[in-house]
Every structure is written in C-alpha cells, then in structure tokens.
Image: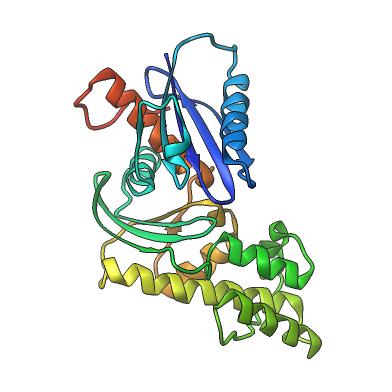
Amino acid sequence: MIYLGLDIGSLTCDAVAIDSEGRFLAGAVVPTGARNLEAIARARTEVLAALDPPSTAQVVVVSTGYGRDRVADRLAAVTEITCHAEGIADLLPRTTLLIDIGGQDSKAIRLDAGKVLDFAMNDKCAAGTGRFLEAMARALEIEVTELQDLDAATTSTSALSSMCTVFAESEVVSLLAGGTAVPSIVRGLHRAIAVRTAGLVRRVAPSLTGLSISMSGGVAHNAGVVRALSEELGLPISVPPRPDLVGALGAALIARRRHLGSTSSRPLRT
C-alpha cells in the first residue's frame, strides 16, 4: 500500500509518498501554473515514478492546499493547517510554534504534540510570501534562488517603508536608481518580511518563552528570511530538510492513519 499526500498550492503542487509503516519513499514539487489539474497529475506521476523499486500497490490519497477539492480520487481533503501540523510533528516533534510561509499566504500555528491549539493566517495580501519575493527578485533582475546568497554578502540593511507588493517594487526600483547596493536591499526585504511575520506570530503567541519554533513552506529554503525572522523573534528557528514538502507529508500521514483506522498518535518514522 502506498499513501500519497498532495498539497496543491498557488505556486507549486507538492507530492509525498510513504509506505504502510509511515516511511518516506519519495517527494516531488512541480509548478502549479494556470492548470492545476495538470499539475496534480504531473506531481502524482513524478512521485510514483521515483519509487525504488517502482510499485504497483494500491495508492490512497489525501489532498490539501487551495486546490485540494480538485483531486477526484482522494480519500479525504484536509486543511493545510492540519496537514502542516501533522507533517512537522513527524519531522520535528518538539515543535510548539510553526511558521509556514507559502506562495500566497503566511500562517502561525500553535501546537501541542502535533495538535493545533490556535492559528493565525494572512491570506488577504501577498506581502511577505513567495509571490512577494518573486516580484522583488524581478525588480532586482535576479533569480529568487540568489536572494539568500546576496543576504549573506552584507551586514547592511536598507529600510523599506511599504510591504505592499506594488509599492515595494517601486521602492526597490528607486533604491537601485539611487545607487543602493543590491545585497543591502535584499537584506531589507528579508527584514520587512520578518517584521510582518512576527506580528502574525504574536497573535497566537504573545509570549514566546519556552516555545520551540520551526518553519515550513517554500520560503523556508531562503536562509536570509529564516535568519531575519530568528533575529526578530529572538529565538532559533528549526527548518526540516524539505520544508516545502511538510504539508504533503502531513497529508500522506493522515491518509495512512485514516485508511488503517489507527488511533495511534504517530506512525513510525524513518
């Protein structure tokens, strides 16, 4: 039996396959694009093709993310809050506060042994999300993947007055025209994201004392954002090896548990 989690987001469609013991088998990330049904099919095909050896076992699917209801053969569609909580509890079980920054929203989730106690979500504006960073990278005429290296190249930080994507892009262009160094602008962008995200965090955790913080979502690949957020919160932040797959992993784990009808708190881990 193969348990497949599909996380259909605004930027990417992520897939994770686990076995009957809850062990990670394979993962895949594909761009969502304008046709999410095609992205879902491609992600599923890629992750199942990556199994070693290839399997002909039955596949049980749980979907999550914005496009979760688009998966026709799912066992269930589960919210991304629940799936991210499930996934991070398997990878970093001591986590009591999870920060998830995805393509078009940010979330702060309070946890207790993988159970959601409270959460806050910013889904009305792209500021501080993956789309925001993509827009800023275009304004700087660089690739998104270059941002963390540019951040590490300086200790200078240019202050930004706006987190609105349109206004921030204009401000970046003005800073460039005024001769401000690109690494300083990038570091300023990361700090602005950190300040905005910290406000979201404090809605669910007015006091951070004693909390163990982790981060998921594609933006967690950017070490500059993680650094800035850690400095803003005054606490270390743990990031799993594949933060973009946390939601899909959680969906796969839920698929396994529901299919087996298990009441155990956690599946076996690798």
Q: Is residue 239 visible?
A: yes
Find the residue positioned furthest to the left. 263
Residue 198 percent location from the top left of the image: 40, 72
Residue 39: name its quadrant: top right
Residue nearer the viewer, 136 or 64: 64
Residue nearer the viewer, 12 or 72: 72
Q: Residue at x 46, y 32 (%)?
A: 71
Q: Residue at x 62, y 20 (%)?
A: 49
Q: Is residue 47 above or below residue 115?
A: above
Residue 158: name its quadrant: bottom right
Residue 229 percent location from the top left of the image: 48, 68
Q: Is residue 70 above or below residue 148?
A: above
Q: Quadrant of the N terminus?
A: top left
Q: Residue at x 44, y 59 (%)?
A: 237
Residue 196: name its quadrant: bottom left
135 sits to left or right of 8: right
Q: Is residue 66 above or below residue 41?
A: below
Find the residue positioned furthest to the top. 56
246 sits to left or right of 263: right
Q: Quadrant of the C terminus?
A: top left
Numbered disc total: 0
